Image (cartoon, rainbow, N blue to C red):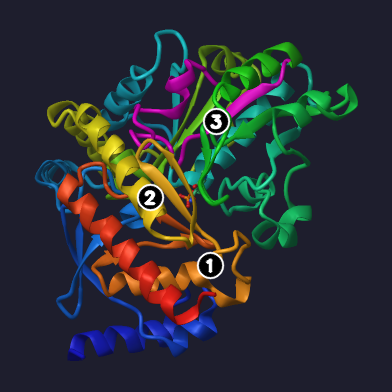
């Protein structure tokens, strides 16, 4: 091991604390130290190279070290790195808000509120929804409706919308009042008593990510919009994972031509370079905040509308046009489906492939169709084995996530699926049956 690597690992083990990580096991292991990226590839500090199979936790869009993103960032640095958005405007934020709003049908999501990451975009939408009701004479409507197994982030408010028991139950009583439903049928069965105190319903459109990449039935989003209209409940879409091309269109809601009242985006907004997020809303919601009395929206952060993040987000949108990212993605989505169908056909441990656009979950089960016991950590073992074949990704339980940068080549995609196949073989010959 190189001297630098040893030093970094020692400092990590002595002082760092990683998200969602059992630290005792972490300290006993030997982490990869990632030092460099180029396109869809990452390098560790020992010089080994891996495909970025989950786009660096679902953020990267156009690849690493992209010249146009680098250029936008360095150009902005020569102007200013950060200025207050409290009391001031800045050019990149103005340009970006107009650009983002322009990605939706005219007259729909006209207003953009910037924040820092997926959780704060959700937090912002929750507070907007609550304050909107206060301003429109329904202050008692402070509750939310969310879906079982949902994941909307880790700050207390966003976590209270989460339906994954292991992550969320321990913090639940400290958050918002939330009614959980399993799907449209359960939502329709809710008595008015349960609905009347709700400000909004929140959903990850098209597909739940942390819930092992589980797609919703086709047409559900439109049905949900109709239900919201009929019950005067706002629709909040969490496009933190699905936004910026992941599902094959710029946003998941465009597949069903649905306009939400609040749309939360983060992860891919800067192409995966810097933390940044936005909550978009309608002119109708915004107008409730206009008036002479105390109608300011009480929300904000020090780095709101950071110019570096905004410059990157603008450059990322330019790349979508210059590189015809979405057009070029369509055959890759089809190729991914073919490759994964092949993987399923060749391995009896691949139980189900769940693909939505350029996001896929590969669910592993025992050959008899039952789940592997949790303590075997099959998903984690397969992802660890995949490293030996040049692929980095993380599972959600025993579902292997395949979500590479949209810019990945078809040959690289083949490499990724081959690595998963080899990793499943390696693990199953040691452990399954
Ligand atoms: N919503 C969804 C659908 C997500 O997948 C995530 C992150 N995985 C979040 C919200 C939270 O985003 P962040 O981690 O940037 O706070």
Is residue 34 in view? yes
Q: For mark 1, does the 10 Å Cα neighbourhood hold few (<14), some (14 to 19), or many (20 or more) residues?
A: few
Q: Which residue is mark 3?
A: 237
Examine the rendered structure and indicate whether residue 47 appears above or below residue 235.
below
What's the residue at 34%, 31% (across, down)? Answer: 248
Horizontally, is 251 left or right of 122 in the view?
left
Start-end of magenta stretch: 232-261
State the image quarter where residue 132 is shown.
top right
Question: Quadrant of the image for the C terminus?
Answer: bottom right
Residue drawn 41% across and 70% down?
Answer: 382
Among the two numbered marks 3 and 1 on one chain, the one whose residue lies closer to the N terminus: 1
Nearer to the camera, 349 or 389? 349
Q: Could you say where residue 321 lies in the image, as x and y percent from the top left?
A: 18, 26
Q: Residues within 10 Å of mark 2 (few under 14, many from 20)?
A: many
Dot 1: element: loop
Mark 2, residue position: 58
- Disc 1 vs disc 2: Cβ atoms closer than 8 Å? no
**Marks 3/2: CA–CA distance:** 17 Å
Let me know if residue 237 is in the magenta part: yes
Q: Which disc, if any, is residue 20?
A: 1
């Amino acid at each position: 091991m190189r001297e630098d690597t040893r030093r970094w690992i020692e400092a990590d083990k002595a002082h760092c604390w990683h998200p969602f990580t059992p630290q005792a096991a972490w300290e006993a292991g030997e982490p990869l130290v990632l030092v460099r990226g180029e396109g869809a590839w990452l390098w560790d500090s020992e010089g080994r190279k891996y495909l970025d199979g989950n786009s660096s936790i679902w953020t990267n869009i156009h690849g690493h070290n992209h010249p146009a993103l680098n250029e936008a960032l360095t150009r902005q640095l020569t102007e200013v790195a950060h200025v207050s958005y409290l009391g001031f405007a800045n050019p990149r934020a103005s340009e970006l808000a107009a650009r983002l709003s322009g990605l939706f049908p005219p007259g729909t999501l006209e207003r953009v509120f910037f924040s820092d990451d997926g959780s704060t975009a959700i937090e912002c939408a929750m507070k907007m929804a609550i304050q909107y009701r206060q301003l429109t004479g329904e202050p008692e409507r402070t509750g939310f409706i969310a879906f079982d197994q949902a994941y909307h982030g880790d700050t207390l408010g966003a976590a209270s919308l989460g339906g994954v028991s292991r992550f969320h139950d321990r913090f639940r009583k400290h958050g918002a009042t939330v009614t959980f439903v399993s799907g449209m049928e359960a939502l329709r069965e809710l008595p008015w008593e349960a609905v009347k105190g709700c400000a909004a319903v929140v959903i990850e459109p098209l597909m739940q990510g942390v819930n092992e990449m589980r797609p919703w039935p086709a047409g559900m989003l439109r049905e949900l919009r109709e239900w919201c209209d009929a019950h005067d409940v706002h629709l909040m879409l969490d496009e933190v994972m699905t936004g910026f091309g992941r599902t094959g269109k710029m946003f998941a809601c465009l597949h069903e031509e649905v306009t939400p009242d609040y749309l939360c985006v983060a992860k891919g907004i800067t192409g995966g370079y810097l933390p940044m997020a936005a909550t978009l809303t309608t002119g109708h919601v915004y107008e409730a905040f206009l008036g002479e009395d105390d109608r300011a929206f009480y929300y904000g952060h020090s780095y709101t509308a950071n110019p570096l993040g905004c410059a990157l987000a603008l450059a990322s949108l330019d790349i979508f046009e210059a590189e015809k990212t979405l057009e070029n993605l369509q055959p890759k989505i089809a190729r991914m489906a073919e490759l994964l169908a092949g993987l399923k056909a060749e391995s009896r441990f691949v139980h189900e492939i769940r693909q939505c656009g350029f996001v896929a979950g590969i669910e592993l089960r025992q050959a008899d169709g039952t789940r592997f016991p949790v303590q075997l950590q099959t998903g984690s073992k397969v992802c660890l084995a995949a490293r030996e074949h040049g692929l980095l990704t993380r599972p959600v339980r025993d579902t292997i996530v395949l979500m590479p940068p949209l810019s990945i080549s078809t040959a690289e995609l083949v490499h990724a699926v081959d690595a998963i196949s080899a990793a499943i073989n390696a693990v199953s010959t040691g452990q399954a049956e």
